[in-house]
Structures are given as structure tokens and as C-alpha cells.
Image: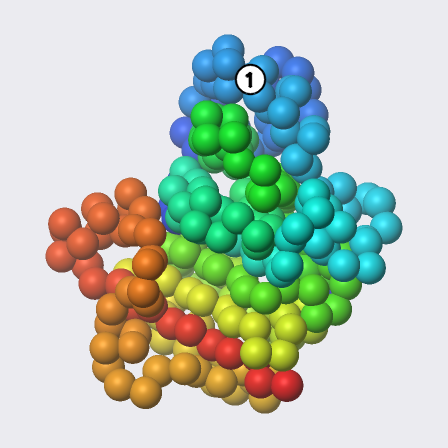
Amino acid sequence: MTPAPRDTGDREQPDDGAPAHAGGSFFGRRKGHKLRSHQADLIDNLLPHLAVDIAASAPARLSELFDDGIAEVRLEIGFGGGEHLIAEAQAFPNTGFIGCEPYVNGMAKILTRIEANNIGNVRLFAGDAAELLAWAPARALARIDLIHPDPWPKRRHWKRRFVQDATVAAMARILKAGGEFRFVSDIDDYCAWTLAHLMRSPDFAWLAERAGDWQLPWPDYTMTRYGAKAEREGRKAAYLRFRRTV
């Protein structure tokens, strides 16, 4: 597999030059503004209980990462502030959710939401999603969401976009037959890029049958702060759904 791309998802970018978390650890590599004391406490004490450890052997089924009663597992790549992931976890309590986010400030925000709402069906991975996809067992996920990822607009940075032929193949390996990859972006170039990569894969079928299928959010979609801001500024997002065919 090619080196893991650096997508942030929902555009939660860190501020430059901020000090690292006092507790050390790899989280400080991608830190933005200084954490509040309670956020730092959650990183140190709650996150270890929810973290997916890819240094250990992968379980036979990803549902083993959760308490009993989990019927299927989904992944959200780059959850940003966590609005979409938390809403999904609350709406589907019998589904397990893995959230992947490399930035410590995004991780602190979602931990605050998890604690406040006593959410038990979310697990977290603070690293590159490509590494998680390579670690997990085949046919382990029912759905993968990538919501407003960093578009890496400069041509020399396109190799950093999450959607690449290698990651499309990795998603095909880990998704169950009939599982979905869902992608949202207000950047036309990245939408076209994603559509081209998925359409040339023999493992995925685009689910759109009419313009409204990609121009409008799917039912019960939770709009993120970035998505709402893009709409206010007149930028229309595309909502792309692809099904794992076999």
C-alpha cells in the first residue's frame, strides 16, 4: 500500500506553533490550540479505554472491539469536531462506530461529547486511516464515511488525498458485500476525482440514478459546522454513495 494520505476530514485544521500535550505521546504531533485541562484529562484517561490498538492482532470481527449487542461496524475517516459521528452513534445504538482522526483537538472534542452523552458504541483511532484499513479483517465494515476531507488543491499534493486507487482497493477489501462508501465535499475537483477513482474500480457501483441523488444529502444526514458554513457561503456539496458490489 502507498504511504498513508493525510486527510483530516471535515476540515478541522490545527493552528501552527502550538505546544505539544504535556503528557507526551504521539498525539502532540498534530496538535492545534492548547487543550483545556478537562480535555487533556480525557485524552489521558478516557481515550486509552476507547482507542483501537493496531499494534495488537486484529480481532476476527471488529464487533469484538465493543460491548455485546453490536450488530455491525462503520468507520468515519477524519471526523473533525465529531458532530456527524456522534449523531450517527446516538441514532444507531446497536451499530459500532470507529472514528479516525489524526488531530488531537478533534479527538478532545469528540471525547467531550462521548462523556457528556454517555456514548458506549464509539471507538477511536488517532492515526492514518490507511493503516487502520490495512490492519482490520476483510469484510469487516458495513459503511465508510468521508465527510468534507481536506481537498489538497495543489497538484503536487494530490497524492495526499485519501481517495487513491490503493485506498479504494483497501476499502473494497474491508467492506462487506452491499456495504457503502459515502463521500461529501463542496470542492468540485475532489468530487470529480473521487467519482473517477470509484467508477473505474470493478468493486464499486455509484448509486445515483438522478441528479437529486448526489445534489441532496441522504435521509437523516447530520450537517457539520463546515458543511453549514459552505452552504452559507454559496458552495454546494455533492453527496456521493458507492456500494460494494460483490
Q: Quadrant of the C terminus?
A: bottom right
Residue 32 in the image: state x and y as whole percent: 46, 27
The vertical placement of 88 against 52, above or below, is below
Q: Secondary structure at mark 1?
A: helix
User: Mark 1 sits on what residue?
Assistant: 40
Q: Nearer the viewer, residue 223 or 71?
A: 71
Q: Is residue 80 at least partly visible in the picture?
A: no
Relative side of 156 to 70, left or right: left
Q: Nearer the viewer, residue 67 or 226?
A: 67
The single residue placed furthest to the right in the displayed view is 57
The vertical placement of 166 against 6, above or below, is below
Snapshot colouring: rainbow
Q: Quadrant of the N terminus?
A: bottom right
Q: Nearer the viewer, residue 173 or 153?
A: 173
Residue 29 in the image: state x and y as whole percent: 60, 31
The vertical placement of 225 against 205, above or below, is above
Taking the spot 55% from the left edge, 17% from the top edge, the residue there is 40
Q: Nearer the viewer, residue 60 or 91?
A: 91
Q: Is residue 30 at least partly visible in the picture?
A: yes
Taking the spot 53% from the left edge, 48% from the top edge, the residue there is 93
Relative side of 90 to 213, left or right: right
Residue 214 in the image: state x and y as whole percent: 30, 74
Residue 34 in the image: state x and y as whole percent: 46, 18
Relative side of 165 to 140, left or right: left
Taking the spot 23% from the left edge, 48% from the top edge, the residue there is 228
